[in-house]
Amino acid sequence: MNIFKPSPSINYNFISSIYAAFALLGITLYSLETYVFAPHKDSDEHETMKELAGSTEGLYLIFIPFIPCFLWSLVVRKEYLRLLEVKPKED
């Protein structure tokens, strides 16, 4: 069984877009934790930001598996689109 062979009954455009959305969500959460919430983690200045930083810590880890899945879906999607191409009729 070849993991890169597309199934004809699955729309890989949709699969790729869903994987891309969740991979982007994971990257966004990581960026927020690293660059926005990190300065407020140990600060007593903004209690709301400190609580938000604590409650979202490590949340990006849930979405990390979508990154390799997205890369896989791009490879399969390329083959899927190649198989969908209509061959021109020769006269």
Image (tube, grey):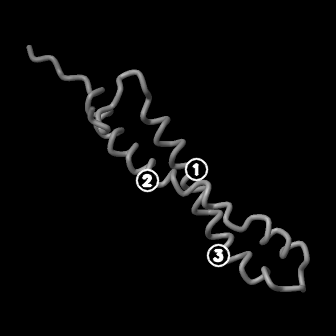
**Residue positioned most to the top:** 91
In the image, what residue type sits under mark 3? Answer: Thr
Image coordinates for residue 76, horizontal then vertical, percent:
34, 39
- Residue visible at 57% across and 62% down in the picture: 27
Looking at the image, residue 45 lies above or below residue 71:
below
Residue 80 located left or right of residue 38:
left
Given residues 56 and 45, the one toward you in this image is 56
Residue under numbered circle 2: 68
Q: Residues within 10 Å of mark 3 (few under 14, many from 20)?
A: few
- Residue visible at 25% across and 23% down in the picture: 86
Disc on the earlier residue, 3 or 2 = 3
Residue under numbered circle 1: 22
Looking at the image, residue 90 lies above or below residue 60:
above
In the image, what residue type sits under mark 1? Answer: Phe
- The quarter of the picture where residue 30 lies is bottom right
- Residue visible at 19% across and 23% down in the picture: 87
Decide: marks 3, 2 in contact (CB < 8 A)?
Answer: no
Q: How crowded is mark 1: few (under 14 residues within 10 Å), some or many (20 or more)?
A: some
Q: Residues within 10 Å of mark 2 (few under 14, many from 20)?
A: few
In three-dimensional space, the C-alpha distance between marks 3 and 2, rounded to whole angstroms, equals 21 Å
